[in-house]
Amino acid sequence: MKKIALHWQILIGMAAGIGIGLIFNQFSWGNLIITDWIKPFGNIFINSLKLIAVPLILASLIKGVSDLKDISSLSQMGLKTIVTYILTTLIAVSIGLGIVNLIQPGASIDEDTRQELLDAYAGDAELKKQDAERQKESGPLQALEDLVPDNIFGAASDNSNMLQVIFFAIFFGIGLILIPDKQSKPVKDFFDGFNEVILKMIDIIMLAAPYGVLALMAALVVEAPSADLFYALLYYSLAVVSGLALMILVYILIVWIFTKKSPGFFLKGISPAQLLAISTSSSAATLPLTMERVEEHMGVDAKVASFVLPIGATINMDGTSLYQAVAAVFIAQAFGMDLTLGTQLGIIATATLASIGSAAVPGAGMVMLVIVLGQAGIPEAGLALIFAMDRPLDMLRTSVNVTGDAAVSMLIAKSQDQLHDPQVKNWDDDYPKK
Ligand code: ASP
């Protein structure tokens, strides 16, 4: 029997999940069935992906860095990666600002709806504000200080410390480059093997992907707020969605121009990761699949992918920065505020930094939005206005975040002469071992 491609399997799972959610929503007992009996399988699926994230980063990054052979190619690639990530984020925020000024979605919100939204979500908005307060209380160099863990097991024990794990892995890799071959060989061989095991584990987890996303989508449907509020935020959502779609076009174009890889090649390669990002709303949970797709299906050498992607998953969030720009201006418009050019330029800077600081987990972009609002002098209570649509938009912006990482990894691979013809390995390629 011909195997159905992974993106179709995931799409079918998502559609079935939405269908099941809608059907069960009709019955009073339906929600309970979904949350008690179906949602846990979605959580198990997400947990198993998150479980892989830290060992994956450790193994692949140590292997990737030590394969580079010398420190100068590492620093060269590092610099290129960071600069490209910042450039794509700046493009994203600018697109967001352009669109929100063009569509003016805030102007279409009438007084009653605004009050209704503010009343309905004031409590939730306050929680996000408190989260943001905690992050804001730190000094200017806090982010740098946080990069260096004081205990690697402490860092590895919490998925929100991904940057610390990345720091350790790069540092370890550098040490490995600098010691004589005789000593480094067994360590490298170990991480080589370790990396292969992790990749195989990802293959196994992905066998459950269609069922995992089914459970996640069914739970999302029964937990969604009423559709009326969606309509009130239609123009706002339209602004975010069209900005995100434009950003995908930008990636396709950049990849096409710089690597000569066709839009079809790029989209076919990355689509399963995009769909998983939509289902999980987390770049970190999607990272294992993003790495696999980029390496095996898009031809990016493991040396590049294992360096560029984990860093991208944590700091490159183009979709998030675009959303933050649109949301900030939308809230200002809804409150009847006129933002000066200076304030809007300020939003470009803060949204870029806030997206770098956002964790790769569901809803993180909204927490950091509080900081963007604060800097621009927009009332933070306005967060309540956009709450109802946050989850669906989070799903879409996460998908863009992941696409951006993949696009940049192709550019960096091309510039390092490390973009090859893809070599697809199926999960059971060499099973049973001969
Ligand atoms: N959920 C997003 C991500 O993981 C972050 C955000 O925008 O909330 O990439």
Image (tube, rainbow, N blue to C red):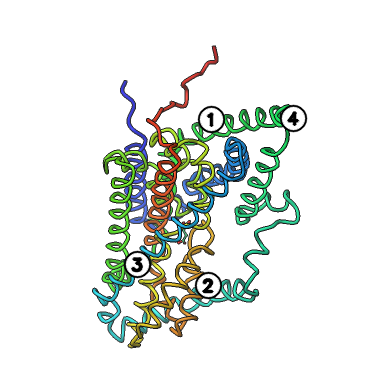
- CB within 8 Å, label 4 to label 1: no
- CB within 8 Å, label 4 to label 2: no
SS under mark 4:
helix
Give the residue displayed 42% in from the left and 63% down from the top: 320
Task: Name the residue carrying label 1.
Answer: 200
Q: Compute the Cα span from label 1 to label 2.
A: 38 Å
- The crowding category of the residue bearing disc 4, from other C-alpha atoms within 10 Å (few below 14, some 14 to 19, many at least 20), is few
Q: Earlier in the sequence, mark 3 or mark 2?
A: 2
Q: Nearer the viewer, mark 1 or mark 3?
A: 1
- CB within 8 Å, label 4 to label 3: no
Amino acid type at circle 2 is Lys
- Residue 119 coordinates in the image, percent (x, y): 42, 81
Q: Nearer the viewer, mark 4 or mark 1?
A: 4
SS under mark 1:
helix
Residue 109 location, quadrant: bottom left
In depth, the one of 43 and 59 nearer the eye is 59
Q: Earlier in the sequence, mark 1 or mark 2?
A: 2
Q: Nearer the viewer, mark 4 or mark 2?
A: 4
**Extreme residue toward the front, this view:** 72
Amino acid type at circle 1 is Lys
Q: Earlier in the sequence, mark 1 or mark 3?
A: 1
Task: Name the residue carrying label 4.
Answer: 183
Q: Compute the Cα span from label 4 to label 3.
A: 62 Å
Kindly tell me whether residue 214 is visible in this rendering.
no
Quadrant placement of the C terminus: top right
Q: Is residue 133 left or right of residue 389?
A: right
- The crowding category of the residue bearing disc 2, from other C-alpha atoms within 10 Å (few below 14, some 14 to 19, many at least 20), is many
- Residue 213 coordinates in the image, percent (x, y): 42, 45
Answer yes or no: disc 4 within 8 Å of ligand 1. Answer: no
Task: Name the residue carrying label 2.
Answer: 128
Q: Compute the Cα span from label 4 to label 1.
A: 27 Å
Give the residue displayed 53% in from the left and 43% down from the top: 49
